[in-house]
Image (cartoon, rainbow, N blue to C red):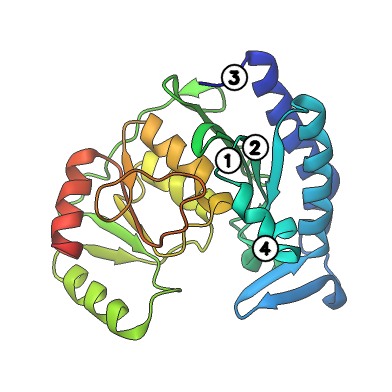
């Protein structure tokens, strides 16, 4: 296990807050059209994403020079970088998660950073620039919001509340999943932002989430945060999530009991 010292934690959290103040927030609701580009269908990038990733890279290298860097925008420019995510010590960086929301001038969006070692996430940070909420977790040492320990709690609703992402599901699988869910779960809109979805599962806002695409910058920090808070996130078959594992599909729940119930409903 990599030693995550208080100094390293403070360095990462301070860096994320500085990047939010200096780069992200000044661009919020202040983007020119030419500062928003489409990388792929329904996948945007803005000048703030690019500038944020550069600043995060520079700061994280200073904090831990021996660690590699796997950032969302670097991987968009050179997909071969993603292959290094599960090998050795590396930072996993999402400079703005929820870029579609950010580009549209609405919440939620966030900054996500994780530190992984040979595919195992050792620490993760999720920062909400608008509220100042900092979620972080260290493997085997718990989860925290604004430095206070936190335990995941279910909503208490009679029918579990589920945010199910069907954005990357093909039609037949999407229809089957929603059919199974509709009579047993209360379906709610997803925030289209993993930096918001994972805290919702800890804070008693949602009980269950389903993800199809599981890119490391979207999930490394959030999976660790929810698991360390006492919830459960893993592959649909119950196997653990690892950085560098390119399989699709993941189920998250506020408690292990809810995970078991959701898996039976959704996946038999």
Whole-percent x, y for residue 193 in the image: 54, 58
Q: Is residue 100 visible?
A: yes
On screen, residue 141 above or below 194? above
Whole-percent x, y for residue 137 in the image: 50, 29
Circle on res. 90: 2
On screen, residue 66 above or below 39? above
Q: Nearer the viewer, mark 4 or mark 3?
A: 4
Between residues 226 and 77, which one lies in front from this camera angle? 77
Earlier in the chain: of badge 1 and badge 4, it is: 4
Circle on res. 87: 1
Number of marks present in the image shown:
4
Whole-percent x, y for residue 195 in the image: 54, 49
Q: Residues within 10 Å of mark 1 (few under 14, many from 20)?
A: some
- What secondary structure is marked by label 2? strand
| Residue 136 occupies quadrant | top right
Earlier in the chain: of badge 4 and badge 2, it is: 4
Instruction: State the residue at coordinates (68%, 48%).
Output: 70
Q: Residues within 10 Å of mark 3 (few under 14, many from 20)?
A: some
On screen, residue 4 above or below 260? above
- What secondary structure is marked by label 1? loop
Circle on res. 79: 4
């Amino acid at each position: 296990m990599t030693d995550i010292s208080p100094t390293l934690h403070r360095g990462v959290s301070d860096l994320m807050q500085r990047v939010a103040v200096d780069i992200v927030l000044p661009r919020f609701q202040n983007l020119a059209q030419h500062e928003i580009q489409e990388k792929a269908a329904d996948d945007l990038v803005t000048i703030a994403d690019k500038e944020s990733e550069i600043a995060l890279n520079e700061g994280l290298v200073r904090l831990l020079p021996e660690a590699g860097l796997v950032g969302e925008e670097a991987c968009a420019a050179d997909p071969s970088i993603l292959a290094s995510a599960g090998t050795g010590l590396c930072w996993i960086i999402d400079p703005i998660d929820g870029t579609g929301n950010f580009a549209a001038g609405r919440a939620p969006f966030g900054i996500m950073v994780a530190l992984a070692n040979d595919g195992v996430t050792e620490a993760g940070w999720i920062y909400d620039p608008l509220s100042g909420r900092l979620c972080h977790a260290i493997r085997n040492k718990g989860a925290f919001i604004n430095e206070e320990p936190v335990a995941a709690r279910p909503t208490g609703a009679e029918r579990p509340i589920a945010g199910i992402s069907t954005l990357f599901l093909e039609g037949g699988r999407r229809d089957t999943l929603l059919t199974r869910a509709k009579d047993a779960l209360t379906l709610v809109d997803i925030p289209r932002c993993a930096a918001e979805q994972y805290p919702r599962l800890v804070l008693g806002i949602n009980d269950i989430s389903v993800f199809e695409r599981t890119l490391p910058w979207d999930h490394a920090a959030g999976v660790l945060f929810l698991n360390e808070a006492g919830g459960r996130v893993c592959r649909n078959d119950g196997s653990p999530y690892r950085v560098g594992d390119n399989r699709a599909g993941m189920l998250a729940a506020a408690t292990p009991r809810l995970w078991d119930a959701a898996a039976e409903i959704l996946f038999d």
